[in-house]
Image (cartoon, rainbow, N blue to C red):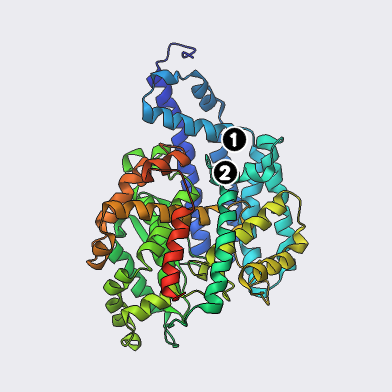
Amino acid sequence: MAPADDATTDAVYDELRDRYEQHLYVQHADMIAMWDQQVMMPEDGSPARAKQRGALSAVGHDLLTDDELGDCLDRLDVDELDGDQRAIVREIRREYDRAASVPTDLVTRLSEYSAENHRIWTDAKAADDYDAFAPRLDGMVDLTRERSAAIDAGRDPYEVQYEESQPYLPLDRVEDIFDELREHLVPLIERIRTDGRELPEIPEGTYDAATQDDLCREALTTLGFDWDRGRFDTAPHPFMAGTQFDARVTTRYDESNPLAGLTAAIHEYGHASYQQGLRQDAYGSPLGSPRSSGVHESQSRFWENHIGRTKPFWELFLPTVTEHFPSLSDLTVDEAYAAVNRIHPENLIRVEADELTYHMHIILRCEIDSALVRGELDVEDVPEVWNDKMNEYLGVRPETDAEGCLQDIHWSMGLASFHGYTIGSVLAAQLNAAVREDLDVDGLVREGEFDPIREWMGEHVHRHGQRYPTDELIEVATGEPLTAEYFLDYVDEKFTELYDL
């Protein structure tokens, strides 16, 4: 369709870009407000921050759904655009169509409600008081359903919400992958529990947080974190937030276990490597934005598991660890490698879970998530269902809700957000197989040469931004569609050898 007035296609396209950029800049400002809330904000700052973030969300929503932006989309002749421009218009159109269906009032209420939840969830977890948080979760379920109905009242509300973070990757395909993982991992974990050899652990002791912080900073520097475009802090729940110009990494420390904070820092570095690897000249457009939470998670799981948990990495990095903690000077590379890969089915905490049992934590959450949004589970029954599923999948039952259904911050912010963690691990294994066809990854890691690995990811994943839909990006990067085959082969080989099964 030709433009409706005398404006050229280039002029209409430029106007569309300008309007969309303003929306994205406001969205990024809200992201920094969220980071500050979790990292630096005074404890009693939540009431004001809720209003601030609500206002930012409303402004960003209004910019995205402005009639003038919609008019630009309608007036554009896409046949006159090049491939990159068409991709940009496709992504803006997808966001616009979804957002335009949602009233600004609902966007504001969701944002304020989520920001208010942060303090309520924090206090409820600290007090092990699920009843204090349950009404807020009930309200979040209602708001999620309301938002899904506004976008498409005739569809499954959970699927509509899922597509917010995982566009272009059908939910039924992901659920098929989850079925494969559940069927494969539960018996493998049980074999390790019953037949696996005993692996060494990090010696008991006190590993002070300040020294762990220095160690994590050394690790980020070793891996190639760009300190001029990032920073490193602690938070109650490790995460990364930012842009290609400002990627902020967090971790948390357990003074009885120096590996937990280190592996979390490497995980979040993976997120930052993606963020810092996005095109700087495309900032403010979909080409300078990450593809999805699943693709983002593939980068963190790749660096955490396929680099940070490998024997070559510990050959390189163990001397740095023992320099910071001399009490570990007798630890061998084989012992460190075994300890960092040890399976802990009895562990109750997702962010501290090992590489294998982690996915049962995710599948459990997705099952509860979907049942809540679809009206198949009442909020008051979540603790019992959670504990039953933990017992079924991992053979362990939480004694407190703080170690069970209250442990994650996510339900205070929204629902249908957990799939990306396991999608990312599956994709990470697929990317790992692809990069190892092109590079001697183990040799590079032993030498501390991480630039070629990061540059490979930059070439195959980061630089594309949202140029391709998710499924197409995976094929561009690896040569085939998303499959669980590489992940299942990888864990079978690794843990069969590690546990002498």
Q: Residue at x 38, y 52 (%)?
A: 431
Left or right of 295, for residue 477: left
Q: Which mark is residue 454?
A: none
Instruction: Give above or below for 107 relative to 420.
Output: above
Residue 322 figure quarter? bottom left
Q: How many marks?
A: 2
User: Residue 391 appears at what percent x and percent y?
Assistant: 67, 71
* Helix, strand or loop at mark 2: helix
User: Residue 79 appears at what percent x and percent y?
Assistant: 42, 18
Q: Is residue 368 visible?
A: yes
User: Residue 402 appears at what percent x and percent y?
Assistant: 64, 72
Marks 1 and 2, the one that precedes in the sequence: 1
Q: Is residue 116 visible?
A: no
Closest to the observer: 43 or 368?
368
Q: Which mark is residue 98?
A: 1
Closest to the observer: 350 or 286?
350
Instruction: Give above or below for 41 relative to 63.
Output: below
Q: Residue at x 34, y 85 (%)?
A: 328
Left or right of 372, for residue 485: left
Closest to the observer: 189 or 229?
189
Instruction: Give above or below for 199 relative to 178.
Output: below
Mark 2 nearby-residue class (10 Å; few <14, some 14–19, many ≥20): some
Instruction: Give above or below for 470 relative to 414.
Output: above
User: Residue 213 appears at what percent x and percent y?
Assistant: 38, 74
Label 1 and label 2: CA atoms lie apart by: 9 Å
Q: Amino acid at mark 1?
A: Arg
* Helix, strand or loop at mark 1: helix
Q: Which mark is residue 164?
A: 2
Q: Amino acid at mark 2?
A: Glu
Mark 1 nearby-residue class (10 Å; few <14, some 14–19, many ≥20): some
- Do labels 1 and 2 touch, CB within 8 Å? yes
